[in-house]
Amino acid sequence: MKKITNLKRKIVRYFCTGICLSSVAFVFQACYGPIQPPPHPSEICIRGKVLTSADSLGIPVQNIKVSVEGGYISKFVDTTDANGMFCIYIHEQDKYNMRFEGIEPDSVSRFFPKDTIIKKSDFYDVYLNIRLDAR
């Protein structure tokens, strides 16, 4: 009789140990989050910062529409945040036609629109510093 109760205790102890270890594994997985897949190899990230022109203090500009188009792709658009930052993931191609323009609700923007062309990069991450001239 005593052997059976010892066997039951061992089984319960091993079961509880297994439950505890698996719950610890789930907690650590929740802390680190799910694994993020790497970006697609044929995509690059064009990110940057939009500032006021060089003759002023270089203040970040919010609500500037950044659009990329050209080649076989459709238009990709992002808007700058409060720090003047933007980020666009786009398929790799030979060149990128970019346009920076204000999207204020009034009919006249505070800044002149700016166009630029970027040639194909050897890297998958491109960083731009763009300065817009005030009207």
Image: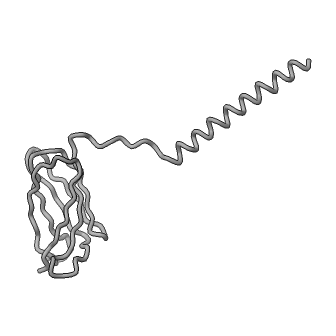
Against 106, is 129 above or below? above
Residue at the extreme front: 122
Against 59, is 122 above or below? above
- Residue at left offset 72%, top offset 33%: 16
Residue 76 seen in render: yes
Residue 64 picture location, percent across and down: 21, 68
Residue at the extreme right: 1
Q: Left or right: 55 with respect to 5?
A: left
Residue 121 picture location, percent across and down: 15, 49
Q: Nearer the viewer, residue 2 or 135?
A: 2
Quarter of the image with the N terminus is top right
- Residue at left offset 79%, top offset 25%: 10
- Residue at left offset 26%, top offset 71%: 62
User: Residue 102 lies in what quarter of the image?
Assistant: bottom left
Q: Left or right: 14 with respect to 127?
A: right
Against 54, is 84 above or below? above
User: Residue 67 lies in what quarter of the image?
Assistant: bottom left
Q: Nearer the viewer, residue 48 or 122?
A: 122
Residue 74 picture location, percent across and down: 14, 49
- Residue at left offset 20%, top offset 48%: 123
Against 66, is 29 above or below? above
User: Residue 105 lies in what quarter of the image?
Assistant: bottom left
Residue 107 seen in render: no
Residue 85 picture location, percent across and down: 27, 65
